[in-house]
């Protein structure tokens, strides 16, 4: 089985996390999104064609030419022109049938195995399709068309970006969409007019369209993880519910943890910290005295100094939060939090959402971050732009 994975996008909606890495290399615990999906393809794929673009050299360096027995071939998308354009770069290497999936959402083996029992077919999920594509169905579980991001609810089936198709689908001609891109679903729509196309419902799918979706993804995997203690927990420490503690890590006296909580290797927590549920702390982190962290992702090599509060936030690796840094995660009027993405104010639809720090961000003593703000790395080169300093929403 040949598989094409699209991993060329700029990931602008996940900035500032994608300022220093391509979106498929964002990690969940010790594996990136791309590595997770490759793991799911073991036993299904003999060869994966990775379509890369933005910071693609980092993907090549991380994945290599062979991933646990799966041959990896790389093709470069010359410039970002949409999923339809990206997928077509794989055409010269395709033999016949192929599986296509996005490289930046989480998919699962049991669903992929169900899909390849039907041909041709696409994977669907019962979900609000407003932010994705709505699958319109005709009789006999066949796909009529895909409508991208419909303004009104016209279906309860979302297109989740996984397809099992013949390579002849690229014979159709498609035009640029209103977004100025070639959309792969346009190939699907042309194909479905002349051929039967089935859909298979997925059991699990975790889209990562925005940075706050990572909080959902971590929670999903954390709930499935088993409690484990490979570190040191000092006396007068309270642990309630599930804790996963890595080797070389120390939880100091007076710390109170309400799980599920994951703490990686070689971390120091406390004394007198309060770590609340669905918090993930990566390797080599230092969480100082009397720090409170709630429902947040703290990536590796980050230091959070004493008397700080981090709520419903994502802190990238190599950050340093000065003493007394407060990250607010709730508006005074209880309205949902909005944040700027691509110069537009986007509703997160979350009552609680703090901040997203890019890699290497540092805050001074007593810094206050308001809900929905994002802090970029000090020096960042974004696609098509010059070096930007101190970017703030």
Image (spheres, rainbow, N blue to C red):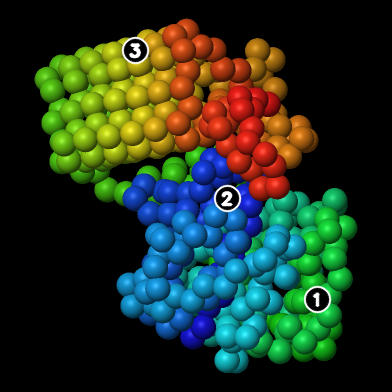
Secondary element type, mark 1: helix
Q: Image check: 369 left or right of 289?
A: right
Q: Nearer the viewer, residue 35 or 111?
A: 35
Could you tell me which residue is drawn at 46 percent across and 12 percent down? 364
Q: Which of disc 2 and disc 3 is earlier in sequence? A: 2
Above or below, 143 relative to 117:
above
> CA–CA distance between discs 3 and 1?
56 Å
Determine whether, in the image, residue 182 is placed left or right of residue 46.
Answer: right
**Residue to which mark 1 is pinned:** 189
The residue at 47%/18% (across/down) is 363
Q: Is residue 19 visible?
A: yes
Q: Nearer the viewer, residue 52 or 105?
A: 52
Residue, disc 2: 208
> Is 102 situated above or below 275?
below
Q: Tell me, yes or no, if residue 33 can be seen here.
A: no
Q: Quadrant of residue 344?
A: top right
Q: Quadrant of the C terminus?
A: top right
Q: Residues within 10 Å of mark 2 (few under 14, many from 20)?
A: many
Label for residue 306? 3
Q: Give how far apart the Cα atoms at labels 1 and 2 are.
A: 24 Å
Q: For the view shown, which residue lies furthest in the front direction?
A: 386
Residue 131 rendering spot, x and y as whole percentages: 72, 51
Question: What's the mark number on residue 234?
Answer: none
Point out the residue furthest to the bottom here.
96
Mark 2 residue element = loop
Q: Please name the residue shown 56% across and 45% down the image.
A: 18
Q: Indicate whether 392 appears above or below 129.
A: above
- Looking at the image, do the residues carrying marks 1 and 2 touch, with CB atoms under 8 Å apart? no
């Amino acid at each position: 089985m040949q598989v094409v994975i699209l991993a060329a996008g700029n990931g602008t909606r996940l900035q500032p996390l994608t300022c220093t890495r391509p979106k498929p290399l964002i990690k969940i615990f010790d594996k990136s999104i791309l590595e997770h999906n490759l793991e799911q393809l073991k036993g299904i794929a003999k060869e994966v064609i990775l379509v890369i673009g933005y910071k693609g050299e980092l993907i090549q360096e991380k994945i290599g030419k062979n991933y646990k027995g799966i041959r990896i071939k790389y093709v470069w998308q010359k410039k970002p022109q949409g999923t339809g354009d990206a997928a077509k770069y794989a055409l010269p290497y395709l033999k016949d049938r192929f599986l296509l999936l996005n490289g930046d959402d989480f998919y699962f083996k049991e669903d992929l195995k169900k899909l390849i029992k039907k041909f041709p077919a696409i994977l669907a999920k019962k979900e609000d399709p407003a932010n994705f594509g709505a699958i319109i169905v005709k009789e006999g579980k066949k796909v009529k068309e895909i409508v991208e991001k419909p303004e009104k609810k016209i279906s309860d089936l979302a297109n989740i970006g996984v397809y099992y198709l013949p390579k002849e689908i690229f014979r159709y001609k498609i035009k640029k969409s209103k977004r100025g891109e070639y959309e792969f679903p346009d190939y699907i729509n042309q194909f479905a007019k002349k051929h039967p196309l089935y859909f298979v419902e997925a059991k699990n799918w975790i889209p990562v369209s925005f940075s706050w979706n990572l909080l959902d993804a971590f929670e999903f995997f954390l709930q499935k993880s088993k409690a484990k203690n490979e570190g040191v927990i000092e006396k007068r420490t309270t642990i309630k519910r599930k804790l996963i503690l890595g080797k070389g890590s120390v939880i100091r006296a007076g710390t109170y943890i309400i799980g599920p909580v994951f703490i990686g290797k070689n971390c120091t927590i406390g004394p007198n910290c309060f770590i609340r549920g669905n918090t993930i702390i990566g390797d080599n982190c230092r969480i100082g005295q009397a720090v409170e962290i709630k429902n947040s992702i703290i990536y590796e090599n980050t230091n959070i100094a004493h008397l700080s509060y981090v709520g419903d936030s994502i802190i990238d690796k190599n950050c340093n939060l000065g003493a007394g840094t407060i990250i607010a995660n709730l508006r005074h009027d209880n309205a949902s939090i909005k944040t700027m993405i691509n110069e537009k104010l986007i509703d997160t639809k979350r009552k609680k959402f703090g901040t997203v720090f890019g890699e290497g961000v540092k805050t001074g003593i007593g810094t206050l971050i308001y809900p929905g703000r994002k802090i970029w790395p000090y020096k960042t080169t974004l696609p098509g732009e010059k070096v930007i300093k101190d970017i703030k929403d």
